[in-house]
Image: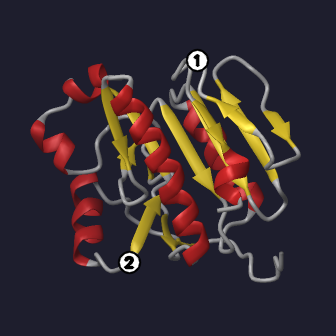
């Protein structure tokens, strides 16, 4: 694949750090754009994904949702438009994320309506042409450092997958012709990545 278009997301340095409510209002006022915020309060402009990446993302989320429903797993699954405020203050929007029922139920109605102050327990990030690999790897480690239990970084361009989990070293698999196990968060769930990548 042509990786010549891969760039870093645009980061806007800010003087006075916005409060949680101010940043939420800022995003609502500019709802045609996508933003994240790093732990230092800098605002990051996220470009839209390409069509193939969007399709790839949706197919993965659909597989997981069907499995969760079939196995009656309690919790909430979220799409790539959902923002979460991590314990370190960053606001991130993973491509696919899941929060346990216990964590979700502990949030107030107001917290759920904004960027919920919780780190998802499971996260998937899919590299698009606008994403630098190192930037995504740093985000994945940030998720783990803030409480995520299992996270997959799928890099279609270099045909590799990085698996992050609590208490273990990052695993790198140099192939997309694989099946990913959801253990320990989703015992029994297996994602046939090869079938999705070729669809």
Above or below: residue 22 compared with residue 115: below
Please give the label number shown on residue 5: none
Side (left or right) of 165 relative to 16: right
Of the pair 59 and 102, the residue shown nearer to us: 59
Nearest to N terminus: mark 2 or mark 1? 2
Residue at the disc numbered 2:
33
Please give the label number shown on residue 184: 1
Point out the image quarter for the C terminus.
Answer: bottom right
Residue displayed at 50% across by 33% down = 122
Crowding at mark 2 (Cα within 10 Å: few <14, some 14-19, many 20+): few
Above or below: residue 57 compared with residue 87: below
Callout 2: helix, strand or loop?
loop
> Where does residue 169 sit, x and y in percent of width and height?
79, 25
Callout 1: helix, strand or loop?
loop
**Residue most extreme to the right:** 174
Above or below: residue 3 compared with residue 167: below
Residue 86, can we see it? no
Side (left or right) of 198 relative to 71: right
Residue 97, can we see it? yes
Residue displayed at 79% across by 50% down = 176
Question: Mark 2 to mark 1: distance in Å?
Answer: 35 Å
The reply to whether dot 2 and dot 1 touch (C-beta < 8 Å) is no
> Where does residue 143 sit, x and y in percent of width and height?
56, 38
Residue displayed at 67% across by 67% down = 131
Residue displayed at 20% across by 42% down = 112
Of the pair 178 and 2, the residue shown nearer to us: 178
Side (left or right) of 78 relative to 147: left
- The image quadrant of residue 74 is top left
Crowding at mark 1 (Cα within 10 Å: few <14, some 14-19, many 20+): few
Point out the image quarter for the N terminus.
Answer: bottom right
> Where does residue 72 sit, x and y in percent of width and height?
32, 23
């Amino acid at each position: 694949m042509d990786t010549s278009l891969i760039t870093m997301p645009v980061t806007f340095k800010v003087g006075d750090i916005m409060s949680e409510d101010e940043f939420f209002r800022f995003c609502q006022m500019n709802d045609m754009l996508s933003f994240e915020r790093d732990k230092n309060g800098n605002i990051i402009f996220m470009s839209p994904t390409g069509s193939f990446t969007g399709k790839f993302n949706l197919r993965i989320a659909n597989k997981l949702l069907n499995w969760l429903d079939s196995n009656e797993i309690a919790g909430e699954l979220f799409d790539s438009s959902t923002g979460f405020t991590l314990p370190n203050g960053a606001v991130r929007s993973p491509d696919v994320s899941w929060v346990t029922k216990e964590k979700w139920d502990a949030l107030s109605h107001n917290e759920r309506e904004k960027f919920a102050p919780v780190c998802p327990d499971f996260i998937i990030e899919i590299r698009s042409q606008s994403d630098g690999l190192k930037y995504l790897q740093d985000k994945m480690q940030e998720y783990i450092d803030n409480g995520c239990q299992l996270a997959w970084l799928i890099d279609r361009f270099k045909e590799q997958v990085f698996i992050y989990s609590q208490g273990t070293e990052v695993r790198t698999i140099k192939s997309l012709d694989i099946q990913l196990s959801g253990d320990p968060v989703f015992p029994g769930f297996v994602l046939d990545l090869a079938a999705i990548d070729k669809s």
